Image: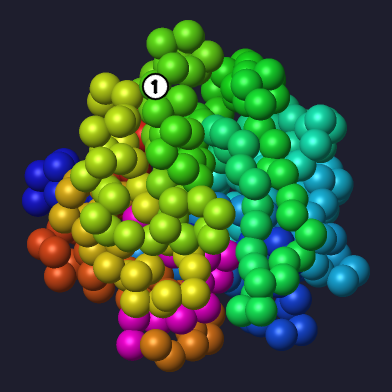
Amino acid sequence: MGANNKVVLTAAITGVLTSPKKFNVPVTPEEMADATEQAYNQGATIVHTHFRDQEEGIMPTWDLDVVGDILSAIKERVPDILICMSTGVMGDDISGPLACLETFKPEMAACNAGSLNYLKVRKDGNWAWSPLMFDNPVEKINRFLEVMNENNVIPEFECFDTGIVRSVKMFKANGMFKGDAHVSFVMGVDSGMPANPDLLPILIKELPENATFQTIATGPVRENIWSVHRRSLELGGNVRTGMEDTFYLPNGEKARNNGELVEALANIVKEVGKEVATPQEARRIMGINA
């Protein structure tokens, strides 16, 4: 099968804020390694990592000891898989994620490429939570990219809306990062762009030259998540799933673990006539010097 038919499949095994007492999200180093192994065995080529505090297991942490233990456990269990480290934080203090990038030098790291009013309303019109600003001004993005450039970390630009996708092209023109752009279309956040497969051809036209793209789909309309991924594959894109993004399989059943979600997405890859890339192939696709 030719290189154009190879698909990079990312597993986002845990996010933040979902309670491990209610959902089967991994928290401890052992649990993170287990979830990564499940995903890898079903075809995942990249694991996207968030790090949670080890007491309640809900809030994010940038404690170097905790992060180091989690990364070591994953690498020991699944040494071949690529690690893409989350870096997202609200506010001006980005010392935590920067310290993690400088200390651990992951092959890839997420780079949130623009700001978003993070909103959700209930059926009665009241806010589900107090409106939040996920602030990512250019100065903050540039600081992340400087550290990534210095440590040979490939940025994965997470884009929550159309204008943010277009901004990545300007970051490239301004020389803010090296190499080709790797862009994630984050679809389904209530105040961002919807999980609508019809948007993908429009978004693809706004990418920088030679960019790769993947879909990250979430939201309450579960069937849209899987139709977005299928359309992405048809259009030459990569895909991501996992318990950070959804808890539900294409048939509407609740997934028991990350492996089931990855297996479902790997099956869709095969159905559209493509093949999941190996980690070595994914490194070549992403421009990583293994």
Q: Is residue 160 above or below residue 151?
A: below
Mostly what secondary structure, the magenta segment?
loop
Q: Is residue 15 above or below residue 94?
A: below
Residue 185 at x, y = what percent?
41, 46
Q: Is residue 28 left or right of residue 87?
A: right
Image label count: 1
Q: Which quarter of the rendered picture does the C terminus lie within? A: top left
Q: Which residues are magenta?
A: 239-251
Task: Say which of 133 and 10 sits in front.
Answer: 133
Question: Residue 260: x percent and y percent?
Answer: 43, 79
Residue holding disc 1: 169
Residue at 76% across / 42% down in the picture?
Answer: 90
Farthest right residue in view: 55
Image point (48%, 9%), residue name:
175
Across and down, in percent, residue 31 comes to 68, 71
The stretch drawn in magenta includes residue 48: no
Towards the viewer: 256 or 74: 256
| Label 1: how many Cα within 10 Å (few below 14, some 14–19, many 20+) | some
Residue 151 seen in the figure:
no
Does the magenta run of residues contain 241?
yes
Residue depicted at 27% across the width and 68% down the height: 227
Q: Which SS class for mark 1?
A: helix
Instruction: Tell whether 282 sits left or right of 186.
Output: left
> Is 138 left or right of 290, judged from the image as shown?
right
Residue 253: x %, y % from top left = 43, 90
Q: Residue furthest top?
A: 174
Residue reaching furthest to the front: 125
Three-letter amino acid code of the residue under disc 1: Lys
State whether residue 104 is above or below residue 217.
above
Query: Can residue 252 be seen at all in this image of the molecule?
Result: yes
- Tell me where residue 275 sits by quadrant: bottom left
